[in-house]
């Protein structure tokens, strides 16, 4: 039972992180960076069409993070977000090495350590599911008890 609570804490935390990263990609400066800044970064690292991809990533991060937080479609959302993190590691963070730029030296980006931790956390959620207190768990119990829709409906 305690293992399920650990997975739940991981799911809630990772979901909140992705909501916090999706908001500025879509809604701008009051949430941190700006949509324009995201488009410029995507274009700089060769992700094209940058405007479409920036909006898509913002939507997946915001909606996927919200779904993770609620424990809805946990495995699917974890897979989609893991793909985003894999691309971020490859296209954005890899050239800067492993470590974050803790000194915030201008012109030096962050290494891939944080993105790798998020990728690993998402992979754990794909393998283990949502834990307790989740829509996924509720839907599964409802279907088994005959109170909800089954996969055949």
Image: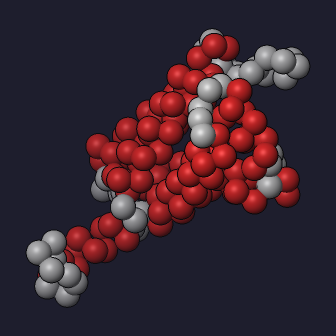
> In this orientation, which residue lies closer to the viewer: 82 or 52?
52
Whether residue 20 is visible to the viewer of this picture, yes or no, is: no
Can you say whether 150 is above or below 46 in the image?
below
Where does the image place residue 114, in percent across and percent down from the top left? 60, 29
Labels in figure, total: 0
For residue 144, above or below residue 8 = below
The x, y position of residue 54, in whole percent, is 63, 46
Q: Is residue 125 left or right of residue 66?
A: left
Q: Nearer the viewer, residue 13 or 97?
A: 97
142 displayed left or right of 7: left
Furthest toward the left, the residue is 152
Residue 7 placement, left or right of 99: left
Residue 43 in the image, given as x and y percentages of width and height: 68, 32
* Side (left or right) of 152 relative to 40: left
Q: Is residue 50 visible?
A: yes
Q: Where, quadrant-wise, is the C terminus in this rendering?
A: bottom left
Q: Quadrant of the N terminus?
A: bottom left
**Against 90, is 41 above or below?**
below
Nearer to the camera, 6 or 147: 147
Residue ranking furthest to the bottom:
147
Q: Quadrant of residue 89?
A: top right
Task: Classify residue 28 by image quadrant.
Answer: bottom right
Residue lying furthest front: 49
Q: How is the image coloured?
A: secondary structure
Foreground of the two, 64 or 133: 64
Residue depicted at 30% across the width and 68% down the height: 137
Look at 53% across and 54% down and name the residue there: 60
Q: Which residue is rendered at x = 60% and y = 48% of the image?
A: 52
């Amino acid at each position: 039972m305690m293992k399920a609570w650990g997975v739940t804490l991981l799911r809630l935390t990772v979901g909140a992180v992705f909501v916090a990263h999706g908001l500025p990609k879509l809604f701008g400066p009051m949430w941190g960076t700006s949509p324009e800044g995201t488009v410029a970064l995507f274009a700089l690292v060769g992700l094209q069409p940058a405007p479409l991809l920036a909006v898509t990533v913002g939507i997946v991060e915001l909606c996927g993070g919200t779904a993770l937080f609620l424990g809805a479609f946990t495995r699917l959302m974890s897979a989609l977000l893991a793909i985003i993190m894999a691309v971020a590691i490859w296209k954005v963070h890899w050239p800067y090495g492993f470590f974050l730029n803790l000194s915030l030296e201008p012109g030096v980006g962050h290494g891939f350590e944080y993105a790798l931790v998020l990728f690993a956390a998402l992979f754990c959620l794909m393998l283990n599911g949502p834990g307790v207190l989740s829509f996924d768990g509720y839907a599964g119990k409802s279907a088994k008890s005959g109170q909800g829709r089954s996969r055949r409906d």
